[in-house]
Image (cartoon, helix red, strand yellow):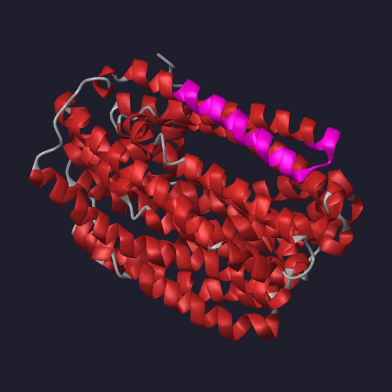
Amino acid sequence: MPPERVRASGRNLKVSLAGHLGVVVFNFITRRMFLGLLGSECTGFAGLCAHILNLLSLLEPGFDAACTFYLYKPLAREDYELASQIARYLRSVYIKICLLTVAVGVLLSPVALALSGDGLETEFALAVYWLILAEGAMSFLLTHRRILPFADQKGYVVTGYGYVTFILSRFVQLAVLLYSRNYIAYLFSGIIAGLVGELALYKKIGRMYPLLKAKSRPPETEHRNAIKSKVRSLFFCKVGSILCSSTDNMAVFAFLGLSAGAEYSNYTMLTGTCLAFVAITTGAVSASVGNLGATSGSARMKKVFGTVYFAVFVLASFFAQALFFACPMIVGAWVGADMILPTITTALFCLQMLVSSVRKPVGVFLDGFGLFEKEKYKSLAEGGITLVATLVLAPRYGIAGVVLGQLCASLGFSFFFEAYILYRYGFGAGFSEFLRTSVKYCSAFFLSLGLSAVIFTVFGGHFHGISGIVFALAECGFSVGAVFSVLFFDCECFRQSGRYFRKMMGSADG
């Protein structure tokens, strides 16, 4: 990548990493306090509400991604008139989406009550649900402004404000929870703190992009039709994505109950934390990839993809192995030994996290090429496979069956289909090249896993608690680093990934 793209990616990466570390700390503290002060049923119901409301994101069929794609070129060429038209068009769309979300969310409240069982009072459950709904609906109101910095390779501004707002609001919320021990007060204080942060971000983006204040006409019909065409394709992708993300959670609550939902959420929080670090790595370069796609050829994009894919595979391999060995110790120290799931279930969680991680760079480059149309039915198929597999496996195998259902869809279909679309229509290259590369990386992963298992078996018994967690992280880092370094030391992707990382982490802020 050219120096300016590397610098932009570096700023995005550093801000995201610093902010996410704070988020991780507060999430773990909050989760522990919830379980201790409110119990597993209340915690499980909060998760249930979040997953039900996740279904409402279908009301936003993909305008943000479509408009971000169409903003890459005008911002890169300083065509601020067109950028202003797209932003104002998006604002009117999201006002309608916000109102529709509230209306449909209220209609869905009986579903939340039905799935919660008899563990909570009706009035309390409804209040929790409506407050979570209000918080989710408000997030749509600034979307038309947030996408401008992301499309302009300045996503670190939005990310930085978001993390600061999150951490400050969590301080307020935890203080309220400790004082009142009332979950309603906790949610309400979070909404107020979030509004303050949103207003600060609103003014910041307004200063960055005066074009938002200019009165401009709606975008030309051809631009609106192009955006709507992308949105239609993205809607199919989104339906499948929601089916995949919601089916597993709803199956846990429906078949296994709120307490099992709390156990499941503990593990998804751990894997989600690791996956978020991987997503930060790919997200930091996403706008640069979009900018690169708007100004460069497919050969250059393919070379950059090879570097990003290698780096993500190494990072995901470390997280998957570290989580597998350290997860029982983390869960035991964090929420209690009674919340530890069987080893096979932990292994399935880690494998699903690995697969989800290595899909990230493929998705980023698909978006960079704007190949929404080519994969629009993929997510529907993935959602259907997940739904059928989960309904069959969850009643018999419990939480392990739920995770296995996800793997059937992601590893059995979506991962390879996405890569085929990218190589066939994005790079104009043969898919077999990707398969050979992935087999090599998987072989390295299993070799490093075997090395980690040997080291952990020989020396792991000497460490317990926090020291055991630190030992697991260190030995997995050593094993993954050693194996991938030895096997790929002479590869261009190895050298380039190290070079890009050093430039990004050392990039100037100005």
Give residue 6's position: percent from left, percent from top: 36, 29
Rendered view: 248 above or below 167: below
Taking the magenta stretch, the answer to whether it contains residue 181 is yes
Residue 452, given in percent of the width and then of the height, sits at: 70, 58
Percent position of residue 253, x then y = 67, 70
Residue 263 at least partly seen: yes
47 and 245: which is toward the camera: 47
Residue 362 vs residue 375: left or right?
right
Asked if residue 192 is among those painted magenta in the image, a careful observer would answer yes
Looking at this view, is 439 or 194 the one in front? 194
| Residue at (72, 61) in percent of width and height | 122
Q: Is residue 392 above or below residue 341?
A: below
Q: Is residue 360 left or right of residue 473?
A: left
User: Residue at coordinates 47% horizontally, 40% vertically from top-left?
Assistant: 139
Tell me where the magenta segment starts and ends, as one range: 177-201
The C terminus lies in which quarter of the figure? top left
Picture quadrant where residue 264 is located: bottom right
Q: Position of residue 197 (x, y in %)?
A: 54, 26
The image quadrant that residue 271 belongs to is bottom right
Which is more toward the observer, 438 or 288? 288
Tell me if I can see residue 482 in this picture.
no
Report the predominant secondary structure element of the magenta stretch.
helix
Above or below: residue 266 compared with residue 390:
above
Tell whether 403 sits left or right of 434.
right
